[in-house]
Every structure is written in C-alpha cells, then in structure tokens.
Amino acid sequence: MKVPLINLESIVTCGYKGASTRLMFACVDKEINISFLTESGKYLGSFIGESRGNILLRKEQYRVSDSIERSCFYSKNFLFGKLYNCRWVLERATRDHPLRVDTEKLKSASKKLKDIAAEILECNDLDRIRILEGVAAQVYFSEFNQLILQNKSDFYFKNRNRRPPLDPLNALLSFAYTLLAANCKGALETVGLDSYCGFLHRDRSGQMSLALDLMEELRPIVADRFVLSLINRRELTISDFTKSGSGAVALTESGRKKLFSSWQTNKREIIKHPFLEEKLEWGLVPYSQALLLSRTIRGDLDEYPPFLWK
C-alpha cells in the first residue's frame, strides 16, 4: 500500500524485511524514525539520521552521567514517577472493579509503593535506589494477576519473566516495553539528547540507557495499561501466540498486527499533560518528557517533573 509520509510519525518493522535506501533517506528528511525488531519483539536498532541538538546540551548530559550525585537527582524522579503511576494502575482497579478484585490487597500494595517512593526521594545512594525499585516491582507485580479480568486461564500472571518470555502475558509486556523504549529513544534524539548515556541505567555497550530511564515512569500507564486492555477487551486470544521448542512464547504475525493497530489507536487518544497543562496525544508524551528533561539538564527547570498521571 501507499501511505503519505506526512501521516507517519515512525515506522516499526518486525522480522528482517528491511527498507530501501530511498525510503530511509526520505524518512530522514521528514524526521521519521525507523525501528527494527525481530519477529518476537526484540529491539535490534533504529535509523534516525543525523543527531539533532547542540553539543553543549550533550556535554552537560555526560557531566551529569559522570556524577553519581547528580545522576541520583534525576533517577529519584524517574522512579518516583514510576511508583506513582503503578499506584494509579492499582487504585484504578479498586475504583472500577471493586467486586472483581481484592480491594484490600490492592490498597495495601499501593500503600507499600507510596512508602517506598517516599524513601526513594530521601535516598542519595544510587545502588540503594535500585534495590528499592526492585522491591517495589515485586510488590506491584505480586498483585498484577488481579488486574486480569478476562481469559484468566490463558493469561494467568505468576511472575515477570523475559529473555525469553515464557507465557503470553509476559510476551505482551516485553513487546509493549520494546515499543515504548523505541518511542523514548526517538524522542530523546529529537530533542538533542544521547539516548545511550543514562543516569539510573549506567553505561553498557549497546544499551540505550537514557531511553530506559525515561520509560520507567511510563511503563505502568502506557505499556502495562495497554497490555491489560488488550486482554480484558478480548482483543487478543491464546491463538495469537506461538511457543517454540525452547519454551519461548511470541506473538504470531496476525497477533502483532492486532497489537500494532491497537497501539496506534491508543497513541492518538487526547489527554491533558499533568505538568504542562496542555492537551496532546498519548503518543507525544515521550517527546514532552524528553523535552522537559532537556530543559532541566540545560538549567531552565530546577527539577525534572515526571509524568504523574491523574
């Protein structure tokens, strides 16, 4: 089919289909990011053209990354935003489905996350912050199965597993996280930041550390909420997954098409940004946060404001 480039924000391709040189050059000219994934959803890389932004911003980003103290300053806010939004997902379930979930357990988990978030804000030890985040993840995912309201026998959640995912729900989470990471990478590069130089996630060859930092606060409300809606609305069924001899579970081609269609629909939903107080599409949230991050690094903002969904 033919699609006008003016209608495209990004291109995500699964498998090894490739892209012509002419298409890639045209996308560079229109600032359209091309991301390459394997059929199972593993991120391979992106084509985004020339780096944007000035060198002064990136040099300041590198100075922040080299300082554990300054890295903590940003990491605390990334994770505070993540735990705040995890609490929102749990609290939303108690509000919308009080007769179908154990409200006491969900509220107890939310209270624990609130306490951990407060401790993170007071902590200035990066290793300790990571430990607290790990504890919070265990609390959050211990109640995640309650949020599955349909097809529970096929999408039962026991624990988070990956590389490879061993059940359909974990396959969906991993795929959604990969898409979100690619969006965050593109947003960071667009505002002139280096997506591979992070603060919470430290330097590792081939790891887009700052993109992983930025997506932390967005995981619960963009990826987790999206996956739950796919299951609870019965948009995907067990027939949309395959299992290899090694036990790895992945989406079928038809399953990926359904997921991409729903992902794009969600990105077009209009919301009001809680900090900027402006209306924008969900798909522009990674860009808005990348822009706020760049402004903070430049010194235009005193502190990075995480996306706290209401």
Image (tube, rainbow, N blue to C red):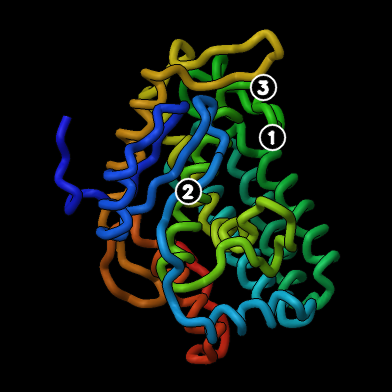
| Image location (x, y in percent) of residue 305 | 52, 76
Q: Check disc 1 and report its element: helix, strand or loop.
A: loop
Q: Are marks 2 and 1 in contact (CB under 8 Å)?
A: no
Identify residue type, mark 2.
Ser
Question: What is the quadrant of the N terminus in the image?
Answer: top left
Question: Which residue appears at 67% of the width and 46% of the height?
Answer: 140
Q: Which residue is mark 3?
A: 166
Label 3 vs 1, first from the N-terminus: 1
Query: Horizontal placement of 9 versus 13: left or right?
Result: left
User: Which residue is disc 1 drawn over?
Assistant: 160
Residue 292 position in % (x across, y down): 46, 77
Amino acid type of disc 1?
A: Arg
Where 222 falls versus 293 (above or below)?
above
Residue furthest to the top in view is 245
Q: Nearer the viewer, residue 76 or 244?
A: 244
Q: Is residue 193 left or right of residue 245?
A: left
